[in-house]
Amino acid sequence: MINTYNVNEKGYYGDFGGAYIPEMMYANIEELRTKYLKICSEEKFQKEFNDLLKQYVGRPTPLYYAERLSLNYNTKIYLKREDLCHTGAHKINNTIGQILLAKRLGKTRIIAETGAGQHGVATATVCALMGIKCIIYMGEVDISRQAPNVARMKMLGAEVKPAISGSKTLKDATNEAIRDWINNPIDTHYIIGSVVGPHPYPDMVARFQSVIGDEVMDQLKKMEGSENPNYVIACVGGGSNAAGLFYPYLDNENVKIICVEAAGKGIDTGKSAATSILGKEGIIHGSKTLLMQSFDGQITEPYSISAGLDYPGVGPMHANLYKTKRGEFISITDKEAMQWGLNLSRLEGIIPAIETSHAFAVLDKKKFKKDDVLVFNCSGRGDKDLDTYIDYFKL
């Protein structure tokens, strides 16, 4: 038996994962767990999924050789352009898959949580596409800092409900969505936006996002003569864009994995979301993983300038990559990430989401060889963050 970094039949990645759920959620989770693989492998499902990814999302997304960036850092840098997906980020790969699954399970109402609003928009989009009722839970703080995405969701016909407890961000929105699902088990499907939550969600979301890594393999083979880069690099909040890029490479140890976390104002400031450094093993949102918690096990408030990275935990796949040292974890401060938002804009004419900017800051933290091939997941575009960029740089 080879050592695999993928999920096992019990829903664990090494020590992490599983389904730690209240009894009232059992029926929902069990229905998903017993049916998702069978439904998703059906030929008709695959055809509909792939057709929508091609015709509606705009896949395959380009793998772009960043010439000026490569010259500046004396290495070969490729960007996987998920920012060019319909809705402006990778999130829609997963929502297309899950809405098709929900329809086959006979669900007529969709709920979701969102941080930056990208997953909320992607969920509202597929609900509009399929004519299904949509409720999005979003932290009150995120609603104010991601106003354009809130407007998009409303235009698409979704009801946006504010989460007003705790830090009023992603974690609290997730709590509200879980409460809703417990109260509406029959007609409702919960589209989780990242590789978090109880099994089968981390695996299911990773599978729907794995189209990213699969395309990279094909594209790189044509461009470099090999489907394997030296490094795959992505920002990690919950971790779905990273999981999508890493998926086909998990068990290929010749391809190094770099996960980039949000250090916020700095690791030791109390305003950070660097889970690998600050976290310890615990349970959040139905899954055993690494999470930021106080001495007595209370979940602590994460912080990042980017609304998509301020999650106090990390997906179980990534927790396992950290513990087994299969992945290298690097944390990037607000200041470094914001500067890279500007750098990428001026070097390559691509304005990235602030989440995505964190990943590129690795170029200043680590030395790469001239012949190294680096693939960065350019997970989202910066439109949603223009207000933050304007305030920060006084544009």
Image (cartoon, rainbow, N blue to C red):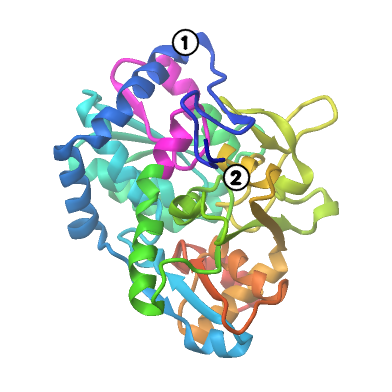
Give whichever of 363, 219 is nearer the camera. 219
- Tell me if 305 is positioned left or right of 62 in this view: right
Give whichever of 157, 353 is nearer the camera. 353
* Residue at the spot 68% in from the left edge and 46% down from the top edge: 322
Q: Amino acid at mark 1?
A: Met
* Residue at image mark 1: 24
The numbered dot on residue 49 is none
State which region is magenta: 177-206
- Helix, strand or loop for disc 2: helix
- Helix, strand or loop for disc 1: helix
* Residue at the spot 54% in from the left edge and 66% down from the top edge: 387
Return the x and y of residue 188 as percentages of the image width and height.
Answer: 32, 23
Return the x and y of residue 121 as percentages of the image width and height.
Answer: 37, 49
Q: Quadrant of residue 254?
A: bottom right
Quadrant including the C terminus: bottom right
Return the x and y of residue 221 as percentages of the image width and height.
Answer: 36, 71
Can residue 121 be seen from the camera position used here?
no
* Residue at image mark 2: 318
From the viewer's perspective, is the residue at label 1 or at label 2 nearer? 2
Can residue 17 be seen from the camera position used here?
yes
